[in-house]
Image (cartoon, helix red, strand yellow):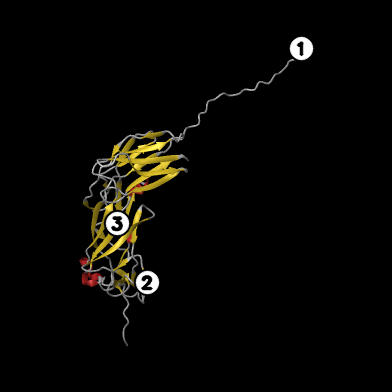
Amino acid sequence: MKTLMIIPILLTSLSTNTRAITPPFASITVSPFYSKGDTTIVVITRSNNLHFSVFIQNDQHMNLCICSDTISRAGTYTYKYDNAYSRNKNTVYVRYYTNDPTASLDTEHFSRDITRAKYELIEDNESITSDNELVVVKSDGTYSTRKVTYSFYGFDGLYVPSFYHKIDLLDYGILVDKNDLYYLSCNPTLVIINYNNIFEDVKGANETVTFNLKIKRATIGYSFELVDDLYVNQETLKLSSIPKEGYVKTKHIYFPVNEMQNQDKYECYFALNNFGIDKDFLIHHFELKALRNTFGDCSNSKYCIVRKSL
């Protein structure tokens, strides 16, 4: 009698290690250099071990480090360089370390010359594209460039407020691609002709009044808000820079009751200084065209209630 012997055979699959090697960084982006102001450097890394340095070369400095860090967690990191060592013409490169801390690699060299700001008018919600470019250093050491496009909403030549006496700053905004949010910056102000001295209680008011603003994250893109505290009288709608009896804090700009008949005299404009990566000075002029309320006080409404004396 023959016995059939079944001998189990263990099949071992032989494979090489195919795990993808995580590059030291995804990108390092450098905004333009300026004679005044900060350059923004944004590092995006998926590695938990990155040491990098950004170097500058020009007619006064050779291989001078202007930004350096050791990153131990994947993420997006933003740095500022104050341009203290920048000259009219500069060459820049990035040095980074691999897993071997004694071995460093240099990226391709690229130019970052000093940019010059300009004056520009913004009309009818137009979009603008930067004259200058961002330099995006890739994980293989090469680089590419891209420009930034900014779009505006609410920047019409005619502003029709939702409330007869009020300019709502949330009616204005700036849109930019999510990859370029790190480079959206400006020092905004709203300037209004101080006709009839209606803003006499606002700090700094003279022939004009200037409201200092800042950009803030909105539902869509960025909008504006007041930098300085502002108070409004609940009865007269007169503004003040300091709290007073009968006044409440406000985030809007109001025109006093009974003064809107002069609305064609209130010339207004937004001034966006140091805007975007070009650091331009943008101006947007607009006229105020407030529509009369349906019901309300008799000076500003189509219909009002008058108390008849007996």
Q: Nearer the viewer, residue 139 or 243?
A: 139
Rendered image quadrant of residue 241: bottom left
Q: Which numbered disc, 1 or 2, marks the residue closer to the eye?
A: 2
Look at mark 3 in the image and give the residue it sits on: 187
The residue lying at 33 percent from left, 58 percent from top is: 214
State the mark number for residue 248: 2
Indicate the position of residue 172 as horizontal and vertical percent values.
31, 57
Q: Earlier in the sequence, mark 1 or mark 2?
A: 1
Q: Nearer the viewer, residue 16 or 79?
A: 79
Is residue 31 visible in the rendered image? The answer is yes
Distance Cα–Cα, label 3 vs label 2: 26 Å
Q: Which numbered disc, 1 or 3, marks the residue closer to the eye?
A: 3
Q: Mark 2 is on which residue type?
A: Val
Q: Mark 1 is on which residue type?
A: Lys
Considering every residue shown, the one lying at the far top of the view is 1
**Vertical comparison of 242 with 275: above or below:** below
Neighbor class of circle 3 (other Cα within 10 Å; few <14, some 14-19, many 20+) is: some
- Specify the quadrant that holds the N terminus: top right
State the mark number for residue 2: 1
Indicate the position of residue 280 as horizontal and vertical percent values.
25, 51
**Left or right: 151, with 140 as reference point:** left
Indicate the position of residue 272 as horizontal and vertical percent values.
27, 55
The residue lying at 41 percent from left, 42 percent from top is: 44
**Vertical comparison of 19 with 277: above or below:** above
Is residue 46 visible in the rendered image? The answer is no
Considering every residue shown, the one lying at the far bottom of the view is 310
Q: Earlier in the sequence, mark 1 or mark 3?
A: 1
Q: Earlier in the sequence, mark 3 or mark 2?
A: 3
Distance Cα–Cα, label 1 vs label 3: 96 Å
The residue lying at 46 percent from left, 34 percent from top is: 100
